Amino acid sequence: MGQLHGGRAATGSLIGLALGDALGFPTEFSDVPGILAKCGPWRGMDLPTPAFVTDDTQMTLALGRGLRTAMARGELTAAGLERPVRDEYVAWWRSPDNNRAPGGTCLRACELLSAPSRAWAEASQIASKGCGANMRVAPIGLVPGLTAAQRSGAAQFQSALTHGHPTGLAASDLTAYAVRALADGARPAELPGLLRGYAHAQRTVYREDWLGDLWRRSQDPTAVSFIARGWDECLGVLDRLDAALAAPDPEADPCLATGAGWIAEEALATGLLCFLLFPEEPLTALRRAACTSGDSDSIACLAGAFAGAWLGAGAWPEEWAGRIEYREELLALGTAWDA
């Protein structure tokens, strides 16, 4: 059904992600009363001028470029994906445009990745499940031609380069799965159940072909116990999402129901909640996500990625989409993947 909304899911998702990011950028470190005092009623929030984005969109593009390079060289594997994505992450870290309050985990990991001889797993921040890995993972869900196993492995691997915590891996996998499901036409109301089923099915699957022996850097006794810990935390936040959807309150701060979004599983759940409260009203979903007490830009970028994957490129009015920062590069990736 999603494609009946106009198609071009990749373009819609990438533009939606960037629009949410830009809308949430000015509100990220404010509480809801402060946002309302500054912006007026949340349902009337307008896209800032100029529409600058944060590291969320910058790193999404970095991953997208690395993924495009890797797939142009043949079948997608960990060995094929590592160097292009690692190079893009390090280039982002070195860029003068990397001045949008980036997360500390990404900065630390990318500095370590910049040493060419260092194994990637030694750079991975195994204790961090910050949202920095799943805010950028949408390209893995949008690029055509991947098997389910490749999509899962690549989603976890791109997380592991910076955020090695098992919940960061699982939340990235779930985010990519959700984007792909919506692009393929899964109905929004079905999504929480699909995510729960996927999490249960993946709970004891450690993707050694992608992650190597990353788990050995944790305190877990086995690879399976390591990855199950991440999926269990994601299943826990899906419980909170279900409870919020059972008694929806569009006027309440979504962070009160599913968390502030600074950590991976909460960013996923709260971004999903904002989308699922308004599945046919994408701008309202973005505005609700931007008017939150937590990591508003990351919550809104995920809500935009979900809404755009479901509704297609036509979800976004040209008056907004036409002035988003990095528009040409977002459109180039989206157009290539929609083709």
Image (cartoon, helix red, strand yellow):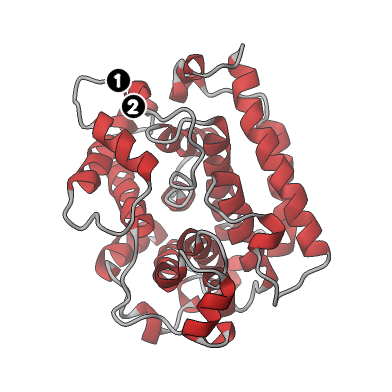
Q: Is residue 323 left or right of residue 289?
A: left
Residue 187 at least partly seen? no
Position of residue 156 measured from the top left corner of the image (x, y, whole percent): 49, 35
Question: Looking at the picture, does residue 168 appear above or below residue 57?
Answer: above
**Residue at the spot x=61%, y=11% of the render?**
221
Q: Which residue is mark 1?
A: 119
- Residue 222 figure quarter: top right
**Residue at the spot x=41%, y=63% of the render?**
14
Q: Amino acid at mark 1?
A: Ala
| Residue farthest to the top, as pictured | 221
Q: Which residue is mark 2?
A: 123
Position of residue 300 measured from the top left corner of the image (x, y, whole percent): 51, 65
**SS assignment at label 2:** helix
Q: Is residue 17 left or right of residue 50?
A: right
Position of residue 325 measured from the top left corner of the image (x, y, whole percent): 28, 70
Position of residue 136 measured from the top left corner of the image (x, y, whole percent): 42, 50
**Residue at the spot x=78%, y=55% of the render?**
242
**SS assignment at label 1:** loop
Quadrant placement of the C terminus: bottom left
Residues tagged 1 and 2 counted as in contact (Cβ below 8 A): yes
Looking at this view, is 273 or 42 the one in front? 42
Residue 296 at least partly seen? yes
> Crowding near pointer 1: few (<14 within 10 Å), some, many (20+)?
few
Q: Amino acid at mark 2?
A: Ala
